[in-house]
Image (cartoon, grey):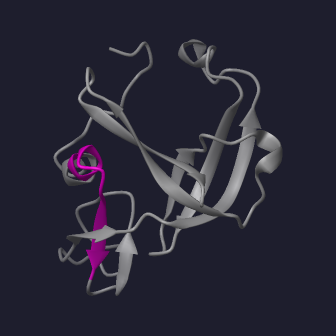
Amino acid sequence: MTNKPMPEPTPVSAPFWQSLREHRIRIQYSPSAEQYVFYPRILAPRTLVDDLEWREISGLGTLYTFTVGDRPTAPPWSDSLPQLLAVVEWDAGPRVSTEIVNAQPGELKVGMRVQPVFCDYPDDGITLLRYELEN
């Protein structure tokens, strides 16, 4: 087990977390709104229709914004500095909060292309979605 807190899937978010364990990314799509939706929810935004379906996306995207954390956000992250905290805008549309890995702070620029990295924590039964610079 890791010494860091881990997400706890809910009935609504379980398909997202299950797909990450399979090294796939599935998010919800609303036919009534004609758009992908993230974070997982019960009703489609704007239309409030119960038509959300889970669809696979590539996970490729653009670095929308980032910050370099040189102080831990909490004690469990004191050994993980610097933290490259980011928001990635998926090619499919929505944005996701994440962390950039396999990069140095000076390499990052808003608008860069990024690709998903699946970080498995088998003892915790969870896979986290992180990002690295696209090859």
Image side of residue 36 versus residue 32, left or right = right
Q: Quadrant of the N terminus?
A: top left
Vertical order, 17 against 115 (above or below):
above
Magenta stretch encompasses residue 48: no
Range of the magenta residues?
18-30
Q: Position of residue 41 (x, y in %)?
A: 28, 59
Vertical order, 100 against 122 (above or below):
below
Residue placed at 37% from the left, 27% from the top? Answer: 6
Residue placed at 67% from the left, 20% from the top? Answer: 72
Q: Residue furthest right?
A: 106
Q: Residue furthest front?
A: 135
Vertical order, 102 against 108 (above or below):
above
Residue placed at 25% from the left, 68% from the top? Answer: 43
Q: Position of residue 98 (x, y in %)?
A: 53, 46
Q: Position of residue 33 (x, y in %)?
A: 34, 85
In front of the other: 120 or 68: 120
Residue placed at 62% from the left, 40% from the top? Answer: 102
Image side of residue 1 versus residue 91, left or right = left
**How many labels were placed on the picture?**
0
In front of the other: 31 or 78: 78
In front of the other: 61 or 43: 61
Q: Position of residue 20 (x, y in %)?
A: 30, 48
Vertical order, 105 against 27 (above or below):
above
